[in-house]
Amino acid sequence: MKSTLVGAAAVAAILAFGLPPALAQQGVKIGFVSTFSGPQAAIGEDMRRSVDLAVEHLGGKMAGKPIQIVYEDDQFKPDVGKQKSEKLVQQDKVDFVSGYIWSNVLLASLKTVVDEGDTILIGANAGPSQIAGELCNKNFFSTSWQNDQTPMAMGEYLNTKGVKNLYLMGPNYAAGKDMLAGVKRTYKGKIEGEDYTKWPDQLDFSAELAKIAQVKPEGIFIFYPGAHGVQFLKQYVQAGLSKTIPLYQVFSIDAITLPQQGELALGTLGAQEWVNDLPNEQNKRYVADFKKKYGVYPSYYGAQSYDAIMLIASAVEALKGDVKDKAKVRAEIAKANFKSLRGGFKFNTNHFPIQNFYIQETVKDADGKMTVKTIATAVTDGKDPYYQKCAMK
Amino acid sequence: MDYLLIQVLNGVQLGLLMFLLAAGLTLTFGIMDLVNLAHGSLYMMGAYFAWTLIGWTDSFVLGTLLALPACFLLGVIVEVTVARRLYARDHLEQVLATFGLILFFNELVRAVWGPDGKSIAVPAFLNRTVNILPGVPYPAYRFALIAVGLVVAVVLAWLVARTRLGMLIRAGASNRRMIAALGVNIELLFSLVFGLGAVFAGLAGLMAAPIASVKIGMGDDILIVAFVIIVIGGIGSIKGAFVAAMVVGQIDIVGRAFLPDFLKTFMGAASASAAAPAISQVLIYLVMAAVLVWRPTGLFGQRS
Amino acid sequence: MPAPWRTPRGIITVLLLLLLAVLPLLTQAFDQRYLLSVGTRIVIWSIAAVSLNMILGYGGLVSFGHAAFLGIGGYAVGILSAEGYESGWMQWPVAIVVAVAWATLIGALSLRTRGVYFIMITLAFAQLVYYLSSGLAAYGGDDGLNISRSRFPGLIELRDKAAFYWLCFALLCATLWFCSRLVHSRFGHVLRGARSNELRMMALGFPVFRYRLAAFAIAGGFAALAGILLANDGAYISPAMMSWVKSGDLIVIVVLGGIGALFGPLYGTIAFFAVEEFLPPLLDLLHRGWGEYWQIVFGPLLVIIALYARGGIDSLLGRRHA
């Protein structure tokens, strides 16, 4: 009995393993690594919806070839992300890899994809400074930003607005430290305080908020991605601080968190390279179709993922579907000859975008739903501060 | 002075929340000798149940009140199907099984409620600040949290010290076999205790929800803190859990509030900003290690 | 009594080892590069699991901080590499020595406690190491650090996937051999005896504390070896290597495979990885889209194994002698 069990398991294993490659067709295969489980799964879901929408807008084909997207879950762990990247490159033999929400997952997976796999990686979110600088690679392109750029934009805006002092708060991990360091790069006022809270989970911000109430700065700058943004905002409002101290944020209030944050987020200001009301045709279509299909607004995670697919499509179309010559594909991608949701799009020498950053305010739309609205342009044609460390010129 | 008072209150509120979570854990551990890693999942389910019920009844109070028996029911179901078979087993097998339960509950929540987190708003009647001293506002909801936590602590103390159930609980914590030999329906007792633990965990989850958020895996990281607390307090001791929770709550808040400035007195500002959060994260572990070196079975634990 | 390898367990184990031994040849023949990566990871984690089994399975010491030693091994190699010391001959011994020293230190403090208190205090020390490495901004913090692989000039090139795999496999065999010798030696008997009845062993005059401390340190050293290999596998180190979740995974693997069974950790690791790789596509076959929720099946599977397969997978392979 037990041996039959083992035997059955072996057969099942062989079947399961043998089948996926057999199902491969002659098409354009794109691997997409994101987080689909655990507390941050909502972000992965938004990216997946946007990728699916992009495929739909393309009619399911690039240069006549069917598009196949292989989604993999990194479970928010760098080693799992690397494993899945390996699988995409070595087993599924994808033509392109995209996705990657988290810096550490991207850093762990980079070599596997771009060096050992010689496959083009289009980063759709994470933008660690190492990859913008010394680890830059001919196979890596980003349709998002470099981590420092967004807070730097906020810093510039705060200068123009004349905010004299600021209190900084963020979680105590690499991205959190980068964000707070980023705003300090450009912000010229006084930093009244800097608090790094526990990562991955600090339930309660009361101690820090009480400190802020005492210090009474002119503004609070925060970075609390995903669910943490919801937590912080609630407590900030409950502490009564929303009435007296304005909140400036990056990555903490977006289309994914707004349904939970609701009216508590009204009036907060954020910085990002894409806002859903950017006035170009492709963006209007994207936002409208997304809202119609899923009932909610898309976030920048999704917009960046949509752009990644469109970027790939532009290269595949230009080469009439022949993606075998990697050097030619790279050259086409580098041209960035596609209609980005951000309007114009061009790459810097380190393959990160040169782009504008906008300030958005949280408002209610005509239907009473929470959304964000562009109120200013903080940075025009911004370049990240690391591109000179990149060997590619 | 008011600032200090506010921070102390913050510590009390955090401590009471942790106590609710730890109380159930120390009960199941002390009486049934069960390492229940899925306790964090019960915390999470409490919040999700509350979200659904508040949505149905459109009332915060009604929703949360209904969520409690739901948690009790869930606890009893888990006890009867899984936990019951684990009492006689090695701690390791308990770890394996309850670890499996964590995975199950996390995926179940994702399948049923979706990957997006949910939000429970602070009820309107608590959505204001209260002046604890003239000119010193404190969020009313957190006050309510303190009140509920204290009530539960008192009720639990009364339950354990002055009722028959409590007597059985204390006896069971000392010597399980004896009370079985004395003719007590052990199975029923254990189901009750497990269910009670689930109620407290769920209560902690749903009370934390308006402050935090309702998300998948919300109990997994908190679980470690709960274990640290019951170890500091001594396994099986409700009093220990209370004291330890209050201590941990205060240390955590005070650490976050005053440590950076304290470090700045002899370190540069940049190093202080970097060192303070790192120290504050390991602080509770250092406290636990120190307590265990001094008292290897925790503050109020059974000396073997 | 039949020869040990004639039993069902024996046959399966030998086949398994043979399969692992020739894996690079097979994957090359069938162009399954990915399988070799999976195999490498299985072999490395098996080393870690065997090291945990030494103290947990045989000694009854449930360490919830074992992954910290993997991290120490990996970080020692990574930091030395980042600082320019790329020679494996220097890195690897240093890494193991550091891990053994740390294990001795925390073992001396932790082994004063028992039961769940021991579990928690080992966890506490692991968290300390975890947060410390997260705080090392110079070495990436929790972004982690991309490193170059250790160099063994003239002897072996670790970038060669097949060569690296065989090195890991050889080290796994060495670890298993060592574990076997340990368990059957006088040292091992004292350890196992102390697990059943500590008081009696002490009454017999054995300094149980010292034996346990030695075992703890040795296990730490072997775990560090696994960490070194892990760092070289991905050419990347990060604090995630030593999160408490990883320590938990290791415990699950050892219990799943069979506590106190020599090859238990190997079965456990393979089962653990196999489920993660094969269950999702299997579920997708049943119904498209179900594969994503594989943990809804895996969780209860663990519960069932805990409840009904006492002694883990090893017990499913037949009765054990002695």
Image (cartoon, rainbow, N blue to C red):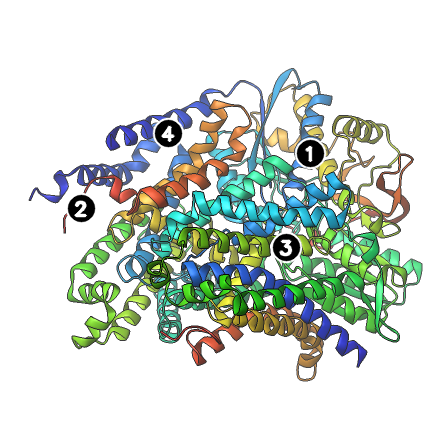
Q: Residue B225: x and y, percent?
A: 55, 63
Instruction: Quickly name the residue at label 4.
Output: A13
Q: What chain does badge 2 belong to?
A: C
Could you give the CA–CA distance between mark 4 and mark 2, rounded to whole angstroms? 27 Å
Q: Amino acid at mark 3?
A: Leu
Dot 3 crowding, Cα within 10 Å, few <14, some 14–19, many 20+: many
Instruction: Quickly name the residue at label 2.
Output: C320
Q: Nearer the viewer, mark 1 or mark 4?
A: 4
- Residue at the image point whose x is 23% and y is 76% from the top: C207
Q: Secondary structure at mark 1?
A: helix
Q: Secondary structure at mark 4?
A: helix
Q: Quadrant of residue C51?
A: bottom left
Could you give the CA–CA distance between mark 1 and mark 4, rounded to whole angstroms? 34 Å
Dot 1 crowding, Cα within 10 Å, few <14, some 14–19, many 20+: many
The label shown at residue B203 is 3
Residues at badges 3 and 1 in contact (C-beta under 8 Å)?
A: no
Q: Are marks 4 and 2 on the same chain?
A: no
Q: What chain does badge 4 belong to?
A: A
Could you give the CA–CA distance between mark 3 and mark 1, rounded to whole angstroms? 44 Å
Q: What chain does badge 3 belong to?
A: B
- Side of C217 relative to B228 (left or right): left
Q: Amino acid at mark 2?
A: Arg
- Side of A382 relative to C37 (left or right): right
Q: Residue B38: x and y, percent?
A: 50, 51
